[in-house]
Image (cartoon, grey):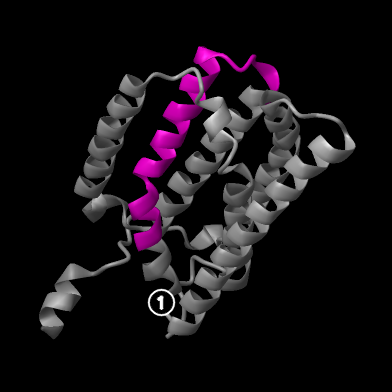
Amino acid sequence: MAPHPAIRPGAFVRYKFLNSLFLGLSVGAVFTLYTPLSPAIFSAGGIGLALGTLMVATQYRRILAPGWFFRLSLLVELVTLSGVAAVLILPLELPLALFVYIGYQLTFSLGNYLVRCETLLMVSIEQLRKLDMAKQAGYLLGMAGAWGLYTGLEQFAGVDGRAEQVISLHWVLVMIETMVLVSLWYAFNRDQLDTDNPLLDEERLLTRN
């Protein structure tokens, strides 16, 4: 089956590779960034995440459409970029930790929705295989890159403080996230982003059954 005309499969796979590369690079940094947060904050954040995910799911009938998928994907990447930039601008204290944590919780609340749309847009087993392989390759490469960067900073640059290492990593992350945004922009045929056209035609499915 052919993918949805709104998406460029090869470009979308590259976008998800870079997105997963960013995730692999950044996954360890949050443990340092979240140090000022209390356990109560994490509990409240978990509740907020569950409620946010629930609210998104209630809107599936309206937002399971290519236009919404593109816009919400763009929102997720812009929120992520703002969090990365904030680490480079603000001191590693409670306000920054809250800003980054809330931003990530917002993006996580859209996680299930984004995966649903990816599957509905890519359609074919072969494209989904390439997509999932690209995600895992990017994530593994990102984690290996983060390990190499932390080790290099400590062994060769004498930077052994966790905060200093995390800030150094974020200079790399801001470049990667910029590449993610550019790749997202080119992963869609924007003239095909019809927000009124749902990815699932319920009436047609009911007729088939």
Is 103 within the magenta? yes
**Quadrant the C terminus occupies:** bottom left
Q: Nearer the viewer, residue 137 or 165?
A: 165
Relative to residue 10, is residue 56 drawn left or right? left
Name the residue carrying label 1: 123
Q: Main secondary structure of the magenta part?
A: helix
- Tell me what residue is drawn at x 72 percent, y 31 percent: 165
Relative to residue 154, is residue 133 drawn left or right? left
Relative to residue 53, is residue 205 drawn left or right? left
- Tell me what residue is drawn at x 68 percent, y 31 percent: 166
Q: Nearer the viewer, residue 174 or 28?
A: 28
- Tell me what residue is drawn at x 64 percent, y 24 percent: 87
Q: Is residue 15 visible?
A: no
Amino acid type at mark 1: Val
Is 167 within the magenta? no
Q: Nearer the viewer, residue 95 or 115?
A: 95
The number of numbered discs placed on residues in the rendered structure image is 1
Q: Give the residue furthest to the right.
A: 156
Give coordinates of residue 8: x percent, y percent.
57, 69
**Quadrant the N terminus occupies:** bottom left
Q: Nearer the viewer, residue 111 or 69?
A: 111
Crowding around mark 1 (Cα neighbors within 10 Å: few <14, some 14 to 19, many 20+) is: some
Give coordinates of residue 93: x percent, y percent.
56, 14
Q: Is residue 131 visible?
A: yes
Secondary structure state at the residue bearing disc 1: loop
Q: Which residues are magenta?
A: 88-116
Relative to residue 124, is residue 156 drawn left or right? right
Give coordinates of residue 128: x percent, y percent.
47, 75
Give coordinates of residue 111: x percent, y percent.
38, 50
- Tell me what residue is drawn at x 65 percent, y 54 percent: 142
Q: Is residue 32 above or below residue 16?
A: above
